[in-house]
Image: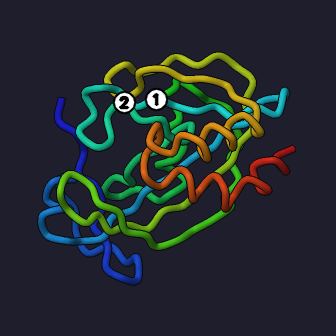
């Protein structure tokens, strides 16, 4: 199965083309990313451990769901698609809490992207895609914060700052 092309965007987040993730990294284009934090009725956040076969940050803990916006998609469409693909989740209502431009080192390149962060409430079953997700864990917000602060090396590079920055919004999910 071939992966769909991801959207390439300029420094103002306007679509300028599409291609593979490797092409995006090699050419230094910006891309679009979605990130989702799911919260359950117990006020726990779902953390995802990335699969060992993912080239970017394998075996690292991450937000509940994350992924690229494909060619022809908008951020919200990609968010719901990724929820279904990675966790088998349908029916969660997502709320956009942030939008930002960012850069990180990724596979020896500087990855430039715009990300939109969503939070959502969900209490149902999850069915992970083992090609993308090694495991998931529901963790109280306090335990997640302590874990991230004490062992940032367990997480993808962006999670410590994202979780700290948006914890109050995550806690406020109704």
For disc 1, the marked residue is 49
111 vs 126: above or below:
below
User: Observer-nearest residue: 2 or 33?
Assistant: 33
State the separation of the CA atoms marked 2 and 1: 6 Å
Res. 96 in view: yes
Residue 93 occupies which quadrant of the picture?
Answer: top right
Q: Residues within 10 Å of mark 2 (few under 14, many from 20)?
A: many
Q: Point out residue 4 in the picture as x, y percentages from the top left corner.
A: 25, 45
Whether residue 81 is visible to the viewer of this picture, yes or no, is: no
Residue bearing mark 2: 59
Mark drawn on residue 20: none
Q: Is residue 168 left or right of residue 146?
A: right
Q: Residue at x 48, y 62 (%)?
A: 115
Name which of mark 2 and mark 1 comes first in the sequence.
Answer: 1
The reply to whether callout 2 and callout 1 are in contact (CB within 8 Å) is yes
Give the camera-side residue of 149 and 160.
Answer: 149
Q: Position of residue 112 (x, y in %)?
A: 32, 68
């Amino acid at each position: 199965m071939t992966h769909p092309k991801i959207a390439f965007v300029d420094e103002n987040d306007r679509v300028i083309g599409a291609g593979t993730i490797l092409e995006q990294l090699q050419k230094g284009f910006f891309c679009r990313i979605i990130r989702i934090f799911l919260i359950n009725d117990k006020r726990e956040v779902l953390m995802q451990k990335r699969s060992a076969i993912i080239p970017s940050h394998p075996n690292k803990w991450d937000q509940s769901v994350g992924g690229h916006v494909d060619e022809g998609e908008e951020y919200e469409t990609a968010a719901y698609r990724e929820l279904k693909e990675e966790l088998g989740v349908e029916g969660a209502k997502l709320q956009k809490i942030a939008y930002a431009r960012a850069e990180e080192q990724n596979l020896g390149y500087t990855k430039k992207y715009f990300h939109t962060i969503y939070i959502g409430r969900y209490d149902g079953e999850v069915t992970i895609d083992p090609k993308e997700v090694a495991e998931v864990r529901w963790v109280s917000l306090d335990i997640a914060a302590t874990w991230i602060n004490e062992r940032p090396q367990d997480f993808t590079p962006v999670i410590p700052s994202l979780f700290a920055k948006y914890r109050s919004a995550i806690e406020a999910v109704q």
